[in-house]
Image (tube, coloured by chain):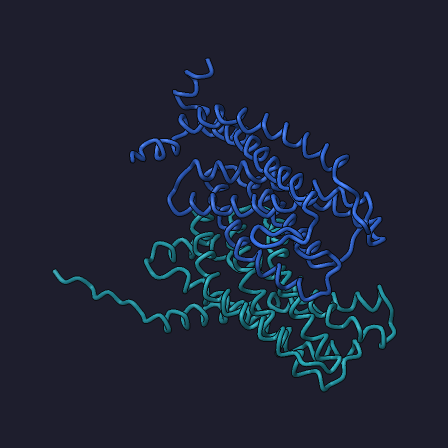
């Protein structure tokens, strides 16, 4: 098999064209899937025997929370690739990950608070999962602040990459350090292998929503990557030709 | 033509040289070196004023107070860890010297702990007594703080290396380093809390030690990478 196309992807012109071509294929299906999953989650799925209708926020909360962690890992891995192999495009990917990741984290925290108020009687509890997610938000904000404080984009890329990697090492440590406290948050309900403890009718909308969030993030990432390439390659000949 | 013999000291004497230089510099500016310690005591003084002068109440929150104060003092002190060397060009010479930069930076971090962490550890029984902690917890207090402040010095050094090239790095440094230091705070305060209640403390203490060992091995490489980016 010929792998040349794969190496070509690392060059800005190919990546730019690829991201622009890929974007609609991710965006529109993800919106359709979100609409279906919202409809199914709000109207089709039966209410929970204990939480009644309040649990329905799970269809936003769980995908947002899992995306927030996934995007951070992706950002750190991309930053690491950029740092080790001096690949500029990997830094551009990492830079494009920050904002969506922060938004997913805020969304997970906000929906969690809205869910927590009727269920636990409090908007916020100093519980392991909530605290970990909050610290994750701080890590995103620190990364963003460090990136913004350098004038030179190359230095910003590398300095923030070191921070992202240190943060990646720290995430499991933070997770297990806060598990020491007693947890209010419910345990794992969805399991890829083996039996899920969630009602089977709820699984389908949740999985579709997860996939929709993933594809939506992909579309946003394509946009962000294009924006990064436009900014980084603004003096390049190929871009001037393409734009004019 | 004779070439001068390349004199390359062994890693341990390199470590000792860097350490001795930093301690000597500190001894000549001892008034500056006292600042983190004074800050530590001043921050602790704020809590009885803000919360309650009742010793029974203070005793309950003493672990948290001691740990937050140690964390802030260590953070503020870390900002000056690499800055003078970067400004007067010493760091550039180190980078160009071909000597292992992570090792030299680890030596500097060890010096930083001896100058800021260790004094806090030594003073801590005194301030803890003022917060109503009884003398049988002194040993535990010193051990947890010694492990914890060493860990804080190592993590703070990463932040210092990342922000040393920035003009106003102080606030940025707090933003970067405090989230990374939160596990230290959790385990340190937990160990102390358990100890004051007469429980077994070996769990959080072992985890603190494990984190210290892990960070001493890995963090110098992150520091070196960050210094190289900062001074280019």
Horizontally, residue A65 falls left or right of residue B10, namely right
Measured from the top left, where is residue A124 in percent x and y?
79, 52
Seen at 81% across and 49% down, the residue is A51
Seen at 40% across and 25% down, the residue is A13
Horizontally, residue B199 falls left or right of residue A207, namely right
Tell me, by letter, which chain the rendering colours cyan: B
Q: Tell me if residue A185 comes above or below residue A3 in the rendering.
A: below
The single residue placed furthest to the bottom in the displayed view is: B136
Q: Viewer-proximal residue, A69 or B98?
A: A69
Measured from the top left, where is residue B96 in percent x and y?
34, 54
Whether residue B8 is visible to the viewer of this picture, yes or no, is yes
Q: Tell me if residue A167 comes above or below residue A177 in the rendering.
A: above
Seen at 43% across and 29% down, the residue is A15
Q: Viewer-proximal residue, A228 or B12?
A: A228
Horizontally, residue B76 falls left or right of residue A49, namely left
How many labels sit on residues? 0
**Res B112 quadrant in image:** bottom right
Q: Tell me if residue A30 comes above or below residue B136 in the rendering.
A: above
Whether residue B119 is visible to the viewer of this picture, yes or no, is no
Horizontally, residue B214 falls left or right of residue B44, namely left
Measured from the top left, where is residue B196 in percent x and y?
74, 79
Seen at 65% across and 48% down, the residue is A137
Of the chain colours in the picture, the one used for chain A is blue
Q: Tell me if residue B129 comes above or below residue A71 in the rendering.
A: below
Quadrant of the drawing holding the N terminus of chain A: top left
């Amino acid at each position: 098999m010929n792998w040349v196309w794969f190496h070509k992807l690392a060059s800005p012109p190919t990546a730019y064209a690829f991201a622009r071509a890929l974007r609609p294929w991710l965006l529109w299906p993800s919106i359709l899937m979100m609409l279906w999953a919202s409809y199914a989650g709000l109207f089709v799925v039966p209410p929970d025997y204990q939480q009644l209708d309040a649990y329905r926020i799970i269809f936003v909360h769980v995908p947002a929370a899992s995306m927030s962690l996934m995007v951070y890992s992706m950002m750190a891995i991309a930053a690491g690739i950029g740092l080790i192999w001096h690949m500029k495009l990997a830094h551009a990917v990492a830079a494009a990950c920050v904002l969506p990741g922060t938004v997913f984290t805020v969304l997970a925290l906000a929906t969690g608070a809205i869910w927590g108020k009727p269920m636990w009687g409090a908007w916020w509890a100093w519980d392991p999962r909530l605290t970990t997610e909050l610290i994750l938000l701080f890590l995103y904000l620190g990364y963003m602040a460090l990136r913004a404080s350098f004038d030179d984009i190359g230095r910003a890329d590398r300095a923030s990459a070191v921070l992202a990697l240190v943060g990646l090492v720290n995430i499991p440590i933070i997770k297990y350090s806060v598990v020491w406290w007693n947890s209010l948050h419910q345990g794992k309900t969805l399991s890829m292998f083996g039996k899920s403890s969630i009602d089977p009718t709820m699984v389908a909308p949740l999985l579709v929503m997860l996939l929709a969030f993933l594809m939506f993030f992909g579309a946003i990432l394509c946009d962000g990557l294009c924006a990064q390439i436009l900014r980084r390659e603004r003096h390049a000949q190929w871009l001037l030709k393409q734009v004019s | 033509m004779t070439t001068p013999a390349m004199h390359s000291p062994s890693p341990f004497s390199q470590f000792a040289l860097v350490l001795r230089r930093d301690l000597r510099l500190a001894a000549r500016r001892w008034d500056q070196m006292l600042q983190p310690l004074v800050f530590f005591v001043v921050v602790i003084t704020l809590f009885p004023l803000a919360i309650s002068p009742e010793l029974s109440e203070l005793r309950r929150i003493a672990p948290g107070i001691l740990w937050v104060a140690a964390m802030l003092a260590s953070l503020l002190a870390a900002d000056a860890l690499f800055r003078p060397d970067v400004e007067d060009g010493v760091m550039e010479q180190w980078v160009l010297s071909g000597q292992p930069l992570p090792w030299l930076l680890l030596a500097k971090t060890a010096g930083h702990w001896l100058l800021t962490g260790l004094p806090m550890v030594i003073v801590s029984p005194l301030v803890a007594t003022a917060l109503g902690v009884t003398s049988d917890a002194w040993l535990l207090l010193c051990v947890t703080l010694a492990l914890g402040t060493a860990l804080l010095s190592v993590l703070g050094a990463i932040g210092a290396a990342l922000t040393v090239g920035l003009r106003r790095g102080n606030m940025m440094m707090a933003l970067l380093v405090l989230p990374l230091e939160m596990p230290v705070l959790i385990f340190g305060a937990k160990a102390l809390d358990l100890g004051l209640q007469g429980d077994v403390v070996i769990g959080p203490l072992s985890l603190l030690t494990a984190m210290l060992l892990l960070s001493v091995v890995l963090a110098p490489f992150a520091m070196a990478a960050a210094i190289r980016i900062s001074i280019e």
